[in-house]
Image: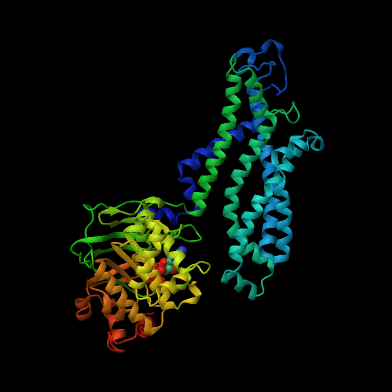
Amino acid sequence: MSPSSTEARRRSPLRRLLADPQAVLSASLLVLVVLLGLLTPLLTDHGPNQVNLDAINAGVGEHGYLLGGDKSGRDIFARLLHSIDTSVVSALIGTSIALAIGITSGLVGGYFGRRTRAVTEWVFNLVMTFPGLLLLIILMPVTKGDYKATMVVFGVLLSPGIYRLVRNLVLGVKNELYVDAARVSGLPDRRILRRHVFTVVRGPVIIATAFLAGSSIAVQSGLAFLGVGSSTVPSFGAMISEGFTNLYEEPQQFLWPSLALGIITASLVLLGNALRDALEGGRPKPSRIVTATSYRPSATEVPSVAGLLTVEDLAIAYPTPTGELKEVVSGVTLSVAAGETLGLVGESGSGKTQTAFAALGVLPPEAVVTRGSIRLDGRELLGLSERELRAVRGTSIAYVPQEPMSNLDPSCTVGAQLVEGVRAATPMSGREARERVLALLARVGIPDPERTFRSYPHQISGGMAQRVLIAGAVAGRPLLLIADEPTTALDVTVQAEILDLLRDLQKDLNMAVLLVTHNFGVVADICGRVAVMREGTVVETGTTDDLFAAPRHPYTRKLLDSILDETALRTDPPTASAGALETETR
Ligand SMILES: Nc1ncnc2c1ncn2[C@@H]1O[C@H](COP(=O)(O)OP(=O)(O)OP(=O)(O)O)[C@@H](O)[C@H]1O
């Protein structure tokens, strides 16, 4: 991350808000509007319903009417100012009722047991079944056209949205270890809710408040536009409705209230968005795609001859609860040549999987690629749409995961899943796809392909499942196969077979392999080159022979020492060396 963006994320939410022109502009407009509303008695002597028959459709400045008169001879400026009061009161009532009901019920429903939640859920589901606007119109005889009473009802109708927001946030936070710790330390529920839970809820609720206020104003104006409610209450909606009927003769009568209402609601929405960015830290897009000309390999990088996959200065970050971004990959640079196998090694948490996921385009939605470039066969992958990425994943780049069993759908036969994948990558008939899958199953060493084809995942072993996934991955003859710890979840005896299979396939298909592992035994077994990762960066890259013979970086030496002390590489069962390595390096 660039220093300036890191600095931006460290600022307090208020400072971030003040630095955002959208927030400053929308908040200033809202303050101005509220001030105009408050100063109404000083700004005009005219009442909103005061009629001067001489001033019917009066022009700007005539008869003491600053913005002219409407078709009943009332002062448009005075009516606008009084309409602000109506809007502000509507927003205050609708918002506070929705917040009071929604927050209280959300905290109770989310924090306390299932039975309490079932009750709150039932009540809010019931409220949500009411058709909002229609109900407000139907209830007019009850509210007697009083817009304040209408806004109370509207606040109740808005409350399920707040309830759900708060309930979900509370459910998310209540099982955090620090909340458990507070409970164990004997803090009363009331205190836990206030100190630990409410702090998490606060930000999203502040954001929602801006949108609630906008909705309340829009609904009050909408009802007035429809002529529902008292005709003596000044309202933008009523003014727009009257101006509408006089649109061709006196368009300004329509223009002023529309403009005022538009400015107020748009400012509230923009302020809500700005608040979200300030409180939640925003989601920057990849800030810069480094071009080939500006890229300089780092000192530790040994570029391979023809880079099929080229990762340059890649940085990936995740937002923390305070809104700051924390980098988990910080400027990774590596390349994999066509047909070669590169081992990406490093201890747990060093960022190997994140780097691989970025190349596959499957980082979780909250991940932010803050800089860098990932090119496959010369094509930039960062910034591709999901559709474009799907096409790349189907044909050029494939993936073999760590946990074969959890990557197969237990409710479908193995054959059905593979056929679906094969047909998605290359359109073909069902029969052709079946033939292709059976051939692939035979190719990956499954003894009875027909039987495995018909089997459900629970009917095959872990090793078989990994062969099935490898078959699916190589079906589209990819240029690059990314295998993330493909043997870790398997039996020791099966691990070597799977590595042999990968090596065979790699030679047969002349496929490049990026092998993510923390096991140097696996690296020595099948990789031609190695990149060593530590704390989000590549600290050393080299051929496997060179790296094992003369590691340059102290961290690589430490990793190697930890397994060389134990036993010879090639004969060492991979999990045994992994365990030793992990213990040593932690
Ligand atoms: N969704 C996420 N939100 C926040 N941090 C994450 C998320 N996913 C991964 N990380 C962090 O990114 C860092 C790198 O994770 P990564 O999975 O790439 O490590 P790894 O080197 O592959 O280790 P392992 O072999 O244990 O998977 C870790 O510190 C991890 O906590």
- Estimate the x, y position of residue 225 in percent, counting from the top left: 67, 28
Compared with 321, 569 (above or below) is: below
**Residue depicted at x 26% and y 60%:** 310
Left or right: where does residue 291 sit relative to residue 172? left
Q: Quadrant of residue 357?
A: bottom left
- As rendered, which of 30 and 321 lies closer to the eye? 321
Residue 403 visible somewhere in the drawing:
no
- Estimate the x, y position of residue 380 in percent, counting from the top left: 30, 53
Q: Quadrant of residue 51?
A: top right
Left or right: where does residue 152 sit relative to residue 352? right
- As rendered, which of 168 and 196 lies closer to the eye? 168
- Estimate the x, y position of residue 535 in percent, counting from the top left: 35, 70
For the C terminus, the image quarter is bottom left
- Estimate the x, y position of residue 250 in percent, counting from the top left: 60, 16
Residue 298 visible somewhere in the drawing:
yes
- As rendered, which of 10 and 585 lies closer to the eye? 585
Q: Residue furthest front?
A: 431
Q: Residue furthest top?
A: 54
**Residue depicted at x 57% and y 72%:** 177
Left or right: where does residue 251 sit relative to residue 316? right
**Residue depicted at x 57% and y 69%:** 176
**Residue depicted at x 45% and y 78%:** 461
Compared with 280, 480 (above or below) is: below
